[in-house]
């Protein structure tokens, strides 16, 4: 088949799909309205979360997600609120959803690592921190957290190396920790 006929076939098939599944202006407007409302709900939830009103924030994030099931920031921040209330398992589910939507979301790996650490699963936490670092090698907080997990497993050499890297990247908590331990990191 020559190139011209191939392009014509693709065009005719595309036209058929468009006519068979028309998207009308009302549907497009409805999606835009839902996305706008979801963003506004998430903004209100963010404010509640920052005020420490996590249960109220969770409700708002839930409504935002109901309007837009692909709203990764709403899942991420709801996960943070679940984590803050001590519900680590629900937090992990939300971080899992974020990573399903965006596998390159380094902060979600770090936060899920924190939740696993809180549940006592330090090895899983290390795997998540490592993935966050793989995605963003300048992620000082992930190095610090991985160092804490290594320390909890009594792997002090690995912990110290991660804390040094974190300190060099500007993490004040790592700098303070190394100073208190008498470790030179510069």
Image (tube, helix red, strand yellow):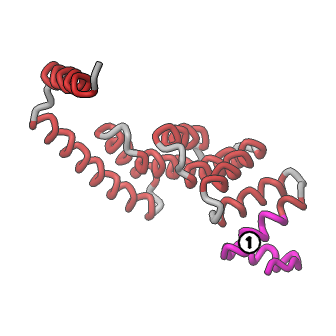
Which residue is painted at 52% across and 47% down in the image? 82
Of helix, strand and loop, which one carries label 1? helix
In the image, is 108 to the left or to the right of 35?
right
Where residue 89 appears, as percent x and y from the top left, is 60, 38
In the depicted view, which residue is nearer to us: 166 or 122? 166
Our reading of the magenta stretch's main secondary structure is helix
**Magenta includes 125?**
no
Which residue sits at x=77%, y=46%? 122
Image quadrant holding the C terminus, namely bottom right
Question: Residue 154 appears at what percent x and percent y?
Answer: 90, 54
Q: Give the side of residue 95 with respect to residue 69, left or right.
A: right
x then y, percent, for residue 93: 54, 37
Instruction: Name which residue lies at 61% across and 58% down.
Output: 136
Q: Is residue 115 above or below residue 163?
A: above
Could you tell me residue 174's position as x and y percent?
A: 74, 71
Quadrant of residue 149 within the rendered picture: bottom right
On-image quarter of the N terminus = top left
Task: Give the number of marks.
Answer: 1
Using the image as rendered, state which of residue 82 and residue 184 is in the foreground: 184
Q: Is residue 136 above or below residue 75?
A: below
Which residue occupies the foreground of this view, 108 or 61? 108
Q: Is residue 176 magenta?
A: yes
Give the residues drawn in magenta, as a range.
160-186
Q: Residue furthest left?
A: 25
In the drawing, does residue 79 fall left or right of residue 180? left
Q: Which residue is mark 1?
A: 174
The 10 Å Cα crowd at callout 1, few under 14, some 14 to 19, many 20 or more, is: many
Residue drawn 87% across and 77% down?
183
């Amino acid at each position: 088949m020559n190139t011209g006929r191939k392009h014509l076939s693709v065009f005719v098939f595309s036209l058929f799909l468009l006519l068979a599944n028309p998207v009308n202006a009302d549907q497009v407007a409805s999606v835009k309205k839902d996305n706008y409302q979801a963003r506004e709900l998430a903004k209100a939830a963010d404010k509640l979360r920052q005020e420490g009103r996590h249960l109220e924030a969770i409700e708002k994030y839930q409504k935002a997600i109901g309007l837009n099931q692909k709203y990764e920031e709403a899942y991420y921040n709801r996960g943070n609120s679940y984590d803050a209330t001590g519900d680590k398992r629900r937090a992990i589910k939300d971080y899992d959803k974020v990573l399903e939507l965006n596998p390159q979301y380094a902060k979600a790996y770090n936060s899920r690592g924190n939740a696993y650490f809180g549940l006592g699963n330090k090895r899983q936490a290390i795997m998540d921190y490592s993935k966050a670092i793989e995605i963003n090698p300048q992620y000082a907080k992930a190095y610090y957290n991985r160092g804490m997990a290594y320390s909890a497993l009594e792997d002090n050499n690995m912990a110290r190396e991660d804390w040094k890297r974190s300190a060099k990247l500007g993490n004040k908590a790592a700098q303070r920790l190394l100073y208190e331990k008498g470790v030179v990191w510069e």
